[in-house]
Amino acid sequence: MEEQARLLVVDDDVEIRELMQEYLEKQGFAVLTAEDGLAMDEVLAREASVDLIILDLMLPGEGGLSIASRVKADKDLPIIIVSAQGEDIDRIVGLEVGADDYISKPFNPRELLARIRAVLRRSGKDESESAPPSSSVLKFGSFELDLTAHRLTRFGEMVALTSGEFDLLSILLKNPNRVLDRDRILDLLTGAERSPFDRSIDVRITRLRGKIEPDPAEPVYIKTIWGKGYMFCPEPGSH
């Protein structure tokens, strides 16, 4: 990493903060810590830049979901939610407020590291991995998805995507005019957690439609095939 990515760990457990800081600093990151939302705000006001926030869900005072929602609205910083609550509803709500990833405690530090690097790579902050040898641009309508630069543009203007939304859109574009059910999409999403009632795909589809569809209520690109899954139509009206 030519320049250290700066991580902010927000957790009220001092032992966890110290362990995460020690581990991540050994991996080459600059790590800041805060015990709650107020301390996080102070760090963000003081520091010139923070590249990613690792945010505990259960915090004293303002809860993690509320913090994630306002940070996304104010600064649009990448966020990984970390929580002992492993229920699907928590992961879904986390995605709804714009979190880029969600990991349940207890977790393997290497899994957290992989997720951090994936989110940083999507946001263009991670220089630790070399870029693919050649650019690959997928086009649909007035949009262009650059798989090398990890960005979506419309008429040359950036369209903000979380890492999860980028991964999902990439999968859909690589499988045009094909019906993909939830299980298949989860299989294709690297590191996706599985459960029989997982609805995180539906949440991402809804958020993605809000960013690319002319009318999200009447989607022309990401079509729902009732009882089967979703189909991506790069040329609206072709199906």
Image: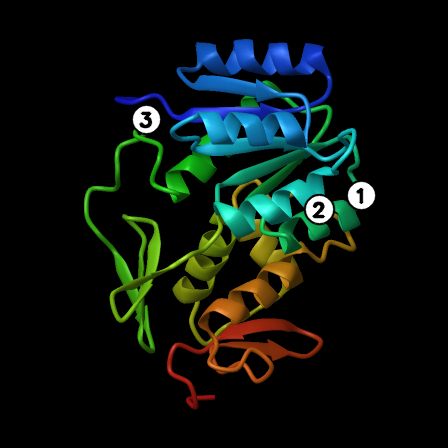
Label 1: how many residues lie within 10 Å, few (<14), some (14-19) or many (20+)? Answer: few
Label 3: how many residues lie within 10 Å, few (<14), some (14-19) or many (20+)? Answer: some
Chain-order first, disc 3 or disc 2: 2
Label 2: how many residues lie within 10 Å, few (<14), some (14-19) or many (20+)? Answer: many
SS assignment at label 1: loop
For disc 2, the marked residue is 91
Q: Amino acid at mark 1?
A: Glu
Q: Which mark is residue 87?
A: 1
How far apart, in angstroms, are the residues tagged by discs 1 and 3? 33 Å
Q: In the drawing, does residue 121 fall left or right of residue 134?
A: right
Q: Amino acid at mark 3?
A: Ser
Q: Which mark is residue 128?
A: 3
Image point (34%, 54%), residue name: 151
Which one is nearer the viewer's eye here, 18 or 33?
33
Chain-order first, disc 1 or disc 3: 1
How far apart, in angstroms, are the residues tagged by discs 3 and 2? 28 Å
Q: Amino acid at mark 2?
A: Arg
